[in-house]
Image (cartoon, helix red, strand yellow):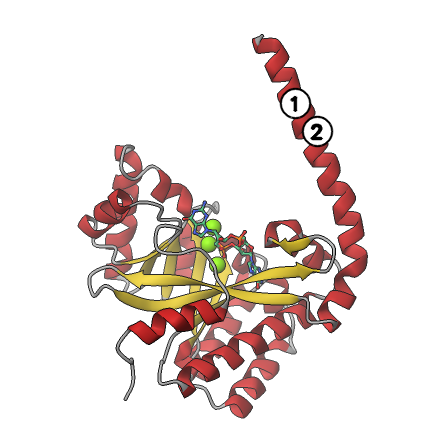
Amino acid sequence: HRAKRLRLGVQIYNDRLAYNSTIKVTLRGQLRSALTNNEFVLYYQPKVDIRQKRLAGVEAIVRWNHPDEGLLQPGLFIDLVEQSGIIHAFTRYTLELAVKQIKAWSALGYELPVSVNLSAYNLLDSAFIPFVRELLDKSNIKPELLEFELTESATMVDIAVSRRVLANFREMGIKTSIDDFGTGMSSFAYLRELDINTVKLDQSFIAGITHEPRDAKIVEGIVSLCRNLNIEIVAEGVESQEQADVLEQLHCYIVQGYFYGRPVPASEITINLNGHERLTQ
Ligand code: C2E
Ligand code: MG
Ligand code: MG
Ligand code: MG
């Protein structure tokens, strides 16, 4: 029975791989039209301050509202976007959407920080900084409401370039964070080399935090290191009250994860904001 089940598992796995690679060929050919038809949409996932019990900000996460396939997760298409040469146009588009949303929330009286995920290629694009500067100029949002999330691998491509680009962001007033922190090969090198505001602890550490003493110890160490360096810390992938309780004991107070909310359309965030006191007068 066991062998049979295993073989069946492999069969299902292969079918899914085959499905994924078939659909990817199709998707690749549709990226450009998706961009011009506004099929990419931003969902927003809450970041919660567990001590103050209030929304600390949101992360903008892209979805592809595909006419035939329905709502697609980024895992299915972000690598295609990055390989296809539309990544520059794509990121500009997501940034414009996020800035519009910051403006809309600000107009309602809510100054809600929004983080946007960048790709490694964006840091290597010399036109990116001028684009961001112009976007900030014409949108008139408070730059500190915008944050860029970068992965360790993105900053690793060229550390000198990354350092320069991050200095430009800081000079513009934009915040920066290292996403999925702890999954790269040289996490600590980035803390040394790069001037960043926030570390986002990868969800793989959080998953074991309640029952793996090692994970808890590692998180504890990263939290105290970040505090000494004056770097904010956000825990990703928090799925239970128990995990949140342990994080609070470890002095990690900003959390993000399904326990607090999945990524949702902006309108759902706005509904929840209406229940909150306004962040500004
Ligand atoms: P990320 O930036 O680390 O985003 C967090 C991912 O973890 C999201 O997956 C989110 O739905 C998921 N997540 C959040 N809370 C939980 C939880 O409690 N449990 C579990 N199991 N998962 C949780 P998603 O939407 O599939 O996004 C995957 C990745 O795609 C993102 O990882 C990010 O690297 C990339 N991505 C998303 N939007 C963009 C974008 O606009 N531009 C670029 N370049 N990349 C993006
Ligand atoms: Mg992210
Ligand atoms: Mg992440
Ligand atoms: Mg992650």
Q: Is residue 23 above or below residue 110?
A: above
What is the number of the mark on residue 14? Answer: 2
* SS under mark 2: helix
Residue 86: where, in percent of width, then height? 73, 66
Amino acid at pointer 1: Val
Image-quadrant location for residue 41: bottom right
What is the number of the mark on residue 79? Answer: none
Residue sitting at the far top: 1
Image-quadrant location for residue 13: top right
Q: Which residue is drawn at the image coordinates 34% and 75% (left, top)?
A: 274
Task: Classify mark 2: residues with Cα within 10 Å, few (<14), some (14-19) or many (20+).
Answer: few
Image-quadrant location for residue 55: bottom left
Residue 68: where, in percent of width, then height? 74, 55
Say whether residue 97 is left or right of residue 257: right
Task: Read off the residue under disc 1.
Answer: 10
Q: Nearer the viewer, residue 181 or 242?
A: 242
Q: Is residue 171 above or below residue 119?
A: below
Task: Classify mark 1: residues with Cα within 10 Å, few (<14), some (14-19) or many (20+).
Answer: few
Residue 169: where, in percent of width, then height? 48, 77
